Image: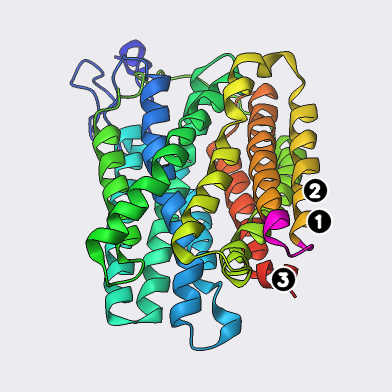
Amino acid sequence: MRGRAQAAEPRAGMLVCVCDPQLDPPANDNRTTRVSTFALGLGFAFAVLAQTVASAALPLAGALLAPREDLFTLPFAAMLLGAALASFPASFLRDAFGRRTGFALGASLGIAGGALVAVGLIQRQFAWVCLGALWLGMAQGFSFFYRHEAAAASGRPTAATAGVMAGGLLAAVAGPTLAGFAEALTAPYFLVGAAVLAALAHTCSLGVAVSLAGDPMPRFRVKTTTPLAAIAWPTAIGAAAWFGMNAVMSGAPLALVGCGIGTAAVFGFIALHVAAMYAPAVPLALVGERVPPLAVALAGLVLVAIGVALQRMGSAEAITAALVCVGAGWSVATVGTTAMIFRAGPPGRAALALHDGLLFSAAILGALAGGFLLA
């Protein structure tokens, strides 16, 4: 019996007696099938579609409903706060109950968040919009673990991470058209169509999540993980990039409107930004393994710094260039820092959660600082 018990690893979420590994697999949907990188990329793409329309709509919704002018970035910041809050649950629930359950829970939060934002806009309730944005952000926090899932399952972490993030490029192509169509259907309610589209995108992401292959069957073994210090430099570089990107992004929609750009056209500018966020992942998926991850991460940080400087110039052309630079820089830096973590060895659950939590915390600070770039 002792020898048989070593075939299964006891852990939270296992609803089967660990003394008899011959019974059915535990309730965390573990199976022997290897997860498809394409499926991970598709689920991430739907989540990015929701992120695209929400990122454009929430700053405008804040400007429309905020009780004070200096609070217009709160809905966007709430979305980022939700993503930060979801980092630890996303990491630990995924291990306890399996990838299907974790990603499905995140998508469900996104559906509820998009619906609540839509209702808040119709009822003109600023607090409801902020709460819905928080839930949308929590869904985003879960979806960013698609890249960790791919990197952990591959011996080529740079290429695998970039391959999943490249799926976000599809969202940039479809985003403006779908957002415009949704807004036309829900006229005269401004931005309601975008909120409903975000909920529908997470519905599609939920469909992908429940169809993912289960996790491999666990084995009883001593787990060796890299020390927590291994994430220090990747987290510092990534946090700086996420701060700069969101500082530019949070203030850009309102700044473009101030430059004479129509509100409907703002979705196109944001889509260009999202395209820049995920387009660099395509070449990185092909050649990324040939470049040191630290060099990739630092190159991305330099691009973000250039974008922040361009945003300060204030013209529509400079803001557009800033959106492209910070989007591309964020993508390159995120791929590089994720590869740095997995190249150092298998990270622990707490390390991944802390890494993503600090990235989103930096993004929150950047969103709150977005208005100062326009001052």
When the figure is inspected, residue 364 is found, relative to residue 28, above or below; the finding is below
Give the residue type that dot 3 points to. Leu
Q: Give the range drawn in magenta.
A: 312-319
Quadrant occupied by the C terminus: bottom right
- Which residue corresponds to mark 2? 306
Classify 2 as above or below 139: above
Q: Is mark 1 on a helix, strand or loop?
A: helix
Labels 3 and 2 touching (C-beta < 8 A): no
* Residue 148 as seen in the image, left or right of residue 133: right
Q: From the top left corner, tell me how far across and down residue 94 is, in percent.
A: 39, 38
Q: Mark 1 points at which residue?
A: 309
Q: How is the structure coloured here?
A: rainbow
How crowded is the residue under tag 1: few (<14 C-alpha within 10 Å), some, or many (20+)?
some
Q: Is 328 inside the magenta-drawn segment?
A: no
The answer to whether 74 appears left or right of 26 in the picture is: right
| Cβ–Cβ under 8 Å for marks 2 and 1 | yes
As rendered, which of 324 and 42 lies closer to the eye?
Answer: 324
Give the alpha-carbon distance from disc 2 to disc 1, as whole Å: 5 Å
- The correct choice, above or below, for 85 with respect to 87 in the image is below
Residue occupying the point 70% across, 49% down? 321
The CA span between labels 3 and 1 is 11 Å
Residue 54 x %, y %: 43, 58
> Which residue sits at x=72%, y=13%?
290
Q: In the rendered structure, which amino acid carries the disc numbered 2?
A: Ile
Observer-nearest of 29 and 181: 181
- Residue 164, position in %: x, y? 49, 28
